Image (cartoon, helix red, strand yellow):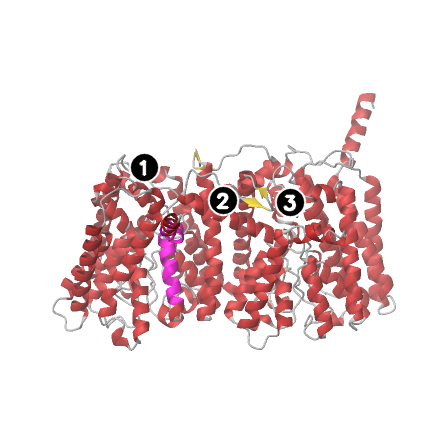
Amino acid sequence: MAVASISVGMFVGALVELGSTNRDTGALFQSGVVTLLFGLALWWATEPEGVRSRDVFAAVGWTWVTVTIFGSLPYILGDTFAAVGIDRSGQIVNSIFESASGYTCTGSTGMTDFSVPGRGMLMYRQITQWYGGMGIVVLAVAVLPFLGVGGLDLMSAEAPGPSSDRLSPRVSETAKRLWATYVLFTVAVMVMFLVIPGPSLYDAIAHGFTTASTGGFSPYPGSIGHFDSVVLEIGVVVCMVMGGANFALHWRLLRGDGGSYVRDPEFRIYVLMLAGCAAVVIGLLWIDGGVPLGTAARGAIFNVVALGTSTGYGVATGSGSPGDYVTWLPAAQMVLLFLMIVGASSGSTSGGIKVMRLQVLVALSIRSIRRSQRPRAVIPVKHGDHSVAEDIVRRVAGFFVVYAVLVMLGIVLLSELSGDLTASVGAIISTLGNVGLALGAAGPTGNFTEAFTEPGRILLVVYMLIGRLEIFPILLMFSAPLRAMRDRVA
Amino acid sequence: MTRHAASEGALLGAASRDSFSRLAIADGLVRLGTASVLASAIGASDDWADAAVLGLTGVSALALGLAGRRTFVRRRQPATARVLSGMASTWAIMVLFGTATYVFSGAISTVDGALFESAAGFSTVALTTLDPSELSLSVALFRGATQWLGGLLGLTAVVVALPRAMRGLVQTPKGEGGSADRLVPTTRVGSQRVFRLYAGLTTACFVGYAATGMPLRGAAIHAMTTVSTGGFSDNADSFATEGGPARVVATFFMIVAGMSFFALFWLLRGNHRRFLASPELRLYVAIIASVTTMLVLDVEGLSVGDALFTAASASSTTGHAVVDWTLFPAASLALLLVAVATGAMGASAGSGLRVVRAWMLVLFAGRELRRQLDPNAVIVVKHANRPLSDAELDHLTGYQIAHFGLCAVGSFLLAVTGAEILDAIWGAISVLSTSGPSLATTAFGDAGGIDRVGRLVLIPGMLAGRLSILPLLLAVASLLQVKDLATRQVRRFVWPDQ
């Protein structure tokens, strides 16, 4: 079902592309048909029964891998990479990279010439991020009632954050409400783009998809910087902040409970963190870097929010322009790197380790120090006014340790494959946090094709998937097949 | 004065003399004074002025230390916080005396430069702003002695003080520290055994260097800085100009210095089986072997010996260098950074995350992964055949998160002073691991490229790296008047020999 559903995006892209003379229309249409047929065949071949807990990770992990592969078909069959002189293997690698970057809402790109793909192909690229934002598995849970058994596990495996909020006692109802909120939020963002002078209807729809999903793709190489509009940047900043908030809070707002934002301890820290980091970066650029206050504030606020919400939009109008953060002071870049690691709220469309996990980790750390004084004291780890269950605390700590190991391993491997340590550090943290933009050659004015080798980009695809599914599903997706094989042998 | 008032005064007097911190400082001053006087006596023929300054500061430290030993007593059992803050205070006082020695001798003209050199010495960080070959014999020996004393302080802390202070919270694993009660039955016996082993290794290292033809001055300084995993050298380019045999001796003793005191103790007692049974030892050796292999494969023209030297220096967090490894390919650099961050074995003179902790974290993460599949399964994490309790694992992870946090803050502060991102991250990790050299400096530890503010920023990191993060946090808590951490004496420190 999840695989079949992505064909809709391909057909929409083909409709937008209709009438153009390049190969993209046919590529999108053919890919849509193949994907739809394959998805329906899978659906037909699968017995409609609930998913067992231990098979959840395999189901979710393999779904995302399959979607990424089928999502790359339009790029492989179209002109996107073929027309810019990249060899066949490079085209396939770039296509998979672009597809993974889309569905995982990472926003990194391997495209070197944005004038080659048609508007339909670029729209399809935007739609991939919209699918990935709320999650294709959540979509499947919403529309397939038989997935109710084990559906919560499926949603938890895909949902960002240490625990998923239930908006209704019924899992499928929760999934429907989440998608409904997501659709409404997307429409609101599109309206915002339309109201502000500058963007066309196409721009509004295209950016609506990738702002709500905190994906960060844009049909323009200059991203939001293409419009060079302060008013639009302010609007996008607000939308990005909302996109990085827990969607359960948005649902409560729709139900008339606007105060839930203020009551939520994660949201408070999330907003304070963004504001604090923006203030630090503004101060550094203004006082230490000699950048005029207004320019510093404009570039700092946008980039802090874009990277802190893992959206990854850019406002650089060229190399060395005020929005090109790779030319900023190292300390300012360090703040951005911190935000890439942390990400935004749990239950949002963003990536990173999430603010809630950071709060739990800090509380755990403080408890360890306090216990040095009182070894037998019972000191709960608190989040807001509530104690966090010990098994969740340990899961969060385990997540962080695995995250740190993956970062170290990824940096060693990527620097071996691509040779640039600074770019490797930035790219691994960026793809694991589904941010999109990185440091050095992979910054706002660079691209990943020139910054990394083909094997390096394949590694980054793996990291995007690991980051989107928050590590465990991808690491454990082989466990169910292996168990089945072991049982068969036994 | 009434009798009641008099007895109250006597009680107050006794209480004010009952101070673990002051007694610890006095002990530190006695050691520092003795080292200074010895360095002065040996170097008198080389430069009498420097020798005189060292002699004067040494005698002052010795006199103050001896007076402190007579004045202060340790009757009450100090709280854990007192033990930790005592260690931090001892380190700070020794650093201040070292600073005074450098300034008064004229070896370093600025106070901040002398403070940095002294802090790097006592925390066994191989960072310097001096050209060591231009120092007089007495100052050069004193500089080496600062690292030797710092290594001894660190080793005593991890073998004797911290395990006792943290008893009930974290048990050191069997094979490394499960046998701690037998090897360190009392504080005094434990301290004596640490000192004997440390001094014995230093002597053996000195003899080894001298036998390779190294001048006695260089042999003495390198012996003190190798066994302490300090990394200071008598040459500006560390071991780059030393001959092959000296490099072999250095490599061997760096690896040994990064080993656990307990493992070495069993080896010296002839219990090879127990020594080899340590899983941490096998991991430590495996890490060095793996890094060596990767370096040989990745760096064109690097010999196996030089690769082993570089890997041993990184893993033991010593900081000696034989080649300019900052020019290595990116993957080798990343690998060296991981080795420096992981560090040496627990209960060793080396520092860093420690191999045993890194391994426990990996085991913990593995358990959490398995729990994703079977949420209700009871999965026991074992190390060296001993199950680790949830409380231990919680403490371990919480402590490491604080360590990561400190790395992040240190990196940011270094970046504020102008260091490039990678240089700042590497610099902070290297200093917290008490290694020293990083991309922000030269491979040979020349910190001239870091500005004055940056060098001052590194000093608290040196303390955290040498004595573990807790003393630093407690010192900060004392400054901020955080009651829970610094002032409450909830739990008493147990001194079994009293």
Q: CA distance from mark 1 to mark 2?
A: 26 Å
Q: Nearer the viewer, residue A12 or A472?
A: A472
Q: Nearer the viewer, mark 1 or mark 2?
A: 2
Q: Residue at x 68, y 63 (%)?
A: B231
> How far from the left and from the top, in percent, is residue A408?
49, 59
Read off the chain for label 2.
A
Is residue A214 visible in this depiction of the protein? no
Residue type, mark 3 in image: Lys
> How far from the left and from the top, in percent, is residue B377?
44, 39
Residue type, mark 2 in image: Val
Residue extending furthest toward the front: A490
Residue, disc 2: A362
Mark 2 crowdedness (10 Å alpha carbons): few <14, some 14-19, many ≥20: some
Left or right, A393 with respect to B38, comes to left
Q: Quadrant of residue A90?
A: bottom left
Q: Which mark is residue A259?
A: 1
Write down the region rendered in magenta: A456-481
Residue type, mark 1 in image: Gly
> How far from the left and from the top, in percent, is residue A257?
28, 36
Q: CA distance from mark 3 to mark 1?
A: 54 Å
> How far from the left and from the top, in percent, is residue B413?
54, 57
Left or right, A244 with respect to A377, comes to left
In contact (CB < 8 Å): disc 1 and disc 2: no
Residue, disc 3: B174
Comes first in the chain, label 1 or label 2: 1
Same chain? Circles 2 and 3 = no
**SS for callout 3:** loop
